[in-house]
Image (tube, rainbow, N blue to C red):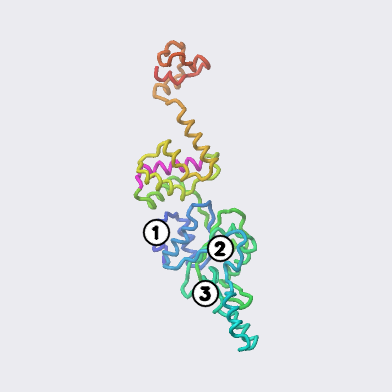
C-alpha cells in the first residue's frame, strides 16, 4: 500500500489526519514497526488502530490494559477443566510422561490476545490500549513481543509469529513509559486539534449537524481548553457527543442557556461545570456595551451631573458615577 492509498482509506473512514500522522503511520506499517501513540484521552488514539485495521483489511485484536494485568490474561491460559478430565479418562491407559506431555499441547491451550495475534494465519492489527495503566512488570514482559515478534511459554517454549501483526500501543501518560519500550516503537503524539481541524472533524464525523452550530461548538470547545480554570479539558470525543446532543434537540445555534443545559456532554466533572456556569452568569450580568457607550469611553467623556441621565435610571436606583466617578451602565442609554 502506498501513502496515497493510505490517505484515501483514512478519508473513507472519516479520520482527519495531518502530514505527521499519515507519514509516521505509513512508515511504521511498511517497516512492521510497533507504533506508540500518546496524547490526552479522547483525541483519537484508539481510532487510529481501528482505521488501520479497516484500511489494511485485517482483523483487529484489542487488549485493554489495567492495573494488575498479567501474562495469563494477555498471553495464554491452560484449560484446566479439560486437562483434569483427560487425566481421569487416561489414567492407567498410558504412561505418566506421555500423559503429562499431552496435557500441554495446543488442544488444551487457550489463546489470549497476544498469543492469538502472533499465531494467526492472517496478519492482524493488535491494539494494546492504555499501556500506561498496566504495571511496569507487564510492560517489560511485552519487550520480547515488540522486538522479536515472539513470546515464551514455559511449558511449550518460544513461539514465533506465523505472521507479523501491526502493533499499536496507546498511552494517556498516566505514568512514564520506559525507554526500553519506546526504543522498540515508532512514536506519535496526538495533540488537541486547533479550531480549523476540530471543525473539519465535526464536518466529517457529524455531517448532519448544522454548519453554523459546528462552528460555534468548535469555538466553545477551544475556549474551554484555553480556560486554565477548567481542570479536565474536553476532547474531540466530547465535541462529537455535544454536537449529537444539540442536533437531537433540533437546535441550530449554541446559546448560553443551551450550554448550561447540555454541559454534561462536554465537561465531565462537577468542578468544571460549576466554573463554566459561573463564567456564563458573569457574562450575562455585564451591561451591554453599545456604540455610544464605547465612544464616550474612548473620548474620555464622563457623566458630569447625575441628573443629566437620571431619566435612564429607575426611581431610587443608585448611579454608578455618583458612587465611584465611573461610567454607569445606564449612561449608554441616556
Residue 210 in the image: x percent, y percent?
A: 34, 45
Would you say residue 213 sits in the magenta stretch? yes
Q: Secondary structure at mark 3?
A: helix
Whole-angstrom CA distance, mark 1 to mark 2, is: 25 Å
**Picture residue at 50% right of the left edge, 44% below the top:** 267
Mark earlier in primary sequence (1, 2): 1
Vertical arrangement, residue 116 with respect to residue 69, above or below = below
Q: Main secondary structure of the magenta part?
A: helix
Q: Nearer the viewer, residue 71 or 109?
A: 109
Whole-angstrom CA distance, mark 1 to mark 3, is: 28 Å
Vertical arrangement, residue 223 with respect to residue 122, above or below = above
| Mark 3 or 2: the one toward you | 3
Would you say residue 248 sits in the magenta stretch? no
Quick one: label 3, few (<14), some, or many (20+) residues within 10 Å?
many
Q: Which residues are magenta?
A: 209-226
Vertical arrangement, residue 154 with respect to residue 218, above or below = below
Residue 50 in the image: x percent, y percent?
A: 45, 61
Quick one: label 2, few (<14), some, or many (20+) residues within 10 Å?
many
Q: Nearer the viewer, residue 45 or 25?
A: 45
Residue 222 in the image: x percent, y percent?
A: 47, 43
Mark earlier in primary sequence (1, 3): 1
Residue 117 in the image: x percent, y percent?
A: 51, 70
Q: Secondary structure at mark 2?
A: loop
Mark earlier in primary sequence (3, 2): 3
Q: Secondary structure at mark 1?
A: loop
Whole-angstrom CA distance, mark 3 to mark 2, is: 21 Å
| Mark 1 or 3: the one toward you | 3
Q: Is residue 107 left or right of residue 221?
A: right
* Label drawn at residue 185: 2
* Label drawn at residue 13: 1
Identify the residue under disc 3: 119
Amino acid at each position: 500500500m502506498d501513502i496515497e492509498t493510505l490517505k484515501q482509506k483514512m478519508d473513507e473512514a472519516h479520520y482527519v489526519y495531518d502530514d505527521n500522522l499519515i507519514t509516521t503511520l505509513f512508515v511504521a506499517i511498511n517497516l512492521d514497526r510497533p507504533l506508540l501513540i500518546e496524547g490526552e484521552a479522547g483525541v483519537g488514539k484508539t481510532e487510529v488502530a481501528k482505521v488501520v485495521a479497516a484500511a489494511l483489511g485485517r482483523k483487529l485484536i484489542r487488549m485493554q490494559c489495567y492495573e494488575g494485568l498479567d501474562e495469563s490474561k494477555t498471553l495464554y491460559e491452560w484449560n484446566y477443566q479439560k486437562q483434569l478430565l483427560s487425566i481421569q479418562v487416561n489414567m492407567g491407559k498410558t504412561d505418566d510422561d506421555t500423559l503429562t506431555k499431552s496435557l500441554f499441547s495446543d488442544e488444551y491451550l487457550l489463546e489470549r490476545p497476544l498469543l492469538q495475534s502472533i499465531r494467526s494465519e492472517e496478519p492482524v492489527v493488535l491494539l494494546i490500549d492504555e499501556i500506561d495503566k498496566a504495571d511496569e512488570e507487564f510492560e517489560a514482559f511485552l519487550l520480547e513481543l515488540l522486538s522479536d515478534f515472539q513470546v515464551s511459554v514455559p511449558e511449550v517454549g518460544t513461539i514465533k509469529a506465523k505472521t507479523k501483526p501491526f502493533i499499536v500501543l496507546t498511552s494517556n501518560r498516566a505514568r512514564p513509559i520506559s525507554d526500553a519500550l519506546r526504543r522498540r516503537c515508532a512514536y506519535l503524539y496526538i495533540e488537541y486539534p486547533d479550531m480549523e481541524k476540530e471543525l473539519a472533524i465535526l464536518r466529517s464525523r457529524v455531517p448532519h449537524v448544522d454548519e453554523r452550530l459546528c462552528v460555534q461548538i468548535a469555538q466553545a470547545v477551544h475556549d474551554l481548553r484555553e480556560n486554565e480554570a477548567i481542570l479536565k479539558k474536553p476532547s474531540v470525543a466530547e465535541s462529537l457527543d455535544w454536537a449529537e446532543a444539540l442536533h437531537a434537540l433540533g437546535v441550530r445555534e449554541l446559546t448560553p442557556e443551551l450550554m448550561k443545559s447540555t454541559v454534561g456532554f462536554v465537561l465531565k466533572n462537577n468542578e468544571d461545570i460549576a466554573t463554566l456556569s459561573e463564567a456564563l452568569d458573569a457574562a450575562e450580568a455585564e451591561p451591554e456595551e453599545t456604540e455610544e457607550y464605547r465612544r464616550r469611553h474612548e473620548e474620555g467623556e464622563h457623566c458630569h451631573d447625575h441628573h443629566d441621565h437620571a431619566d435612564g435610571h429607575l426611581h431610587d436606583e443608585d448611579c454608578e458615577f455618583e458612587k465611584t466617578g465611573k461610567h454607569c451602565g445606564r449612561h449608554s442609554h441616556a
